[in-house]
Amino acid sequence: MLPNKYFVTGNEIVIATHNNGKVDEFKVLLSDYKFKVLTSADLGIGDINETGNSFKENSILKAKSIPSNYYAISDDSGLCIKNLDNNPGIYSARYAKECGGWLEAMKKLYKENYKKNKENFEAKFYCSLSIKFPDDKIFSYSGSVLGKITWPPRGENGFGYDPFFIPFGENITYGEMDYSKKIETDHRSIAFRKLSRAHLKSS
């Protein structure tokens, strides 16, 4: 059992990201709580260098970028493709940027997987969430969803690699899925449920 001091008691919480897709999802996930949701941009904080060797390490780095007097939630997440040694993994966003965009990244990843194993396209979305308290204490939680990549990408919902990924048990991509269902079932929501049970109290 965590000490009571590690429940959020303030009325503001900062999402340590510049990714508007993630901000939108967090606003939905936090909708049951009476928080004013701020972002790194609202505080004039720029992007940080993700120098960690894991999702958790990068998530903690992002949380630490927010000043000590704020509660903050940070996220590091990505697509891990089994046949590509779980790449692009922590480099998911950077890989897309290097390829010239999400579509080109998806095309290249699919081709690389096809060359290695054209029968198996298993992948997972993985997320590490961290929550920072005003005393700079940080707790981290993870969530993942297994599925497969597909070509061509399908759907206009979501962001990033969402149109490229079909979770097991579904026959549509996250990009095709109803937005509310996607947010309730994806890797970020799984990690968030763990975090919220430990640190948040609904109104």
Image (cartoon, rainbow, N blue to C red):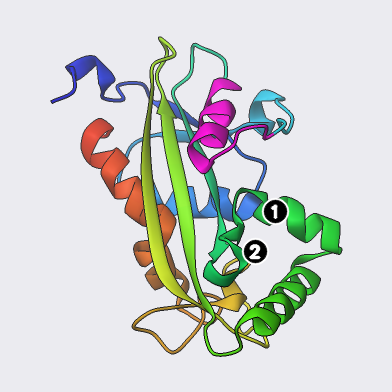
Whether 68 is drawn above or below 149: the answer is above
Tell me the tag on residue 93: 1
- Amino acid carrying label 2: it is Gly
- Residue at the limit of the structure toward the front, as seen here: 116
State which mark lies toward you, 1 or 2: 1
Tell me residue 71's x, y (percent).
Answer: 44, 23
Q: Earlier in the sequence, mark 1 or mark 2?
A: 1
Q: Residue at x 56, y 48 (%)?
A: 23
Give the quarter of the figure containing the C terminus: top left
Quadrant location of residue 111?
bottom right
Residue assigned mark 2: 160
Tell me residue 54's x, y (percent).
Answer: 54, 40
**Residues drawn in magenta:** 50-65
Whether 90 is drawn above or below 13: the answer is below
Pointer 1 and pointer 2: residues touching (CB < 8 Å)?
A: yes
- Residue 89 colored in magenta in the image: no
Identify which residue, 148 or 16, lies in the foreground: 148
Please tell me whether mark 1 sits on a helix, a strand or a loop.
Answer: helix
- Residue 64 colored in magenta in the image: yes
- Amino acid carrying label 1: it is Ala
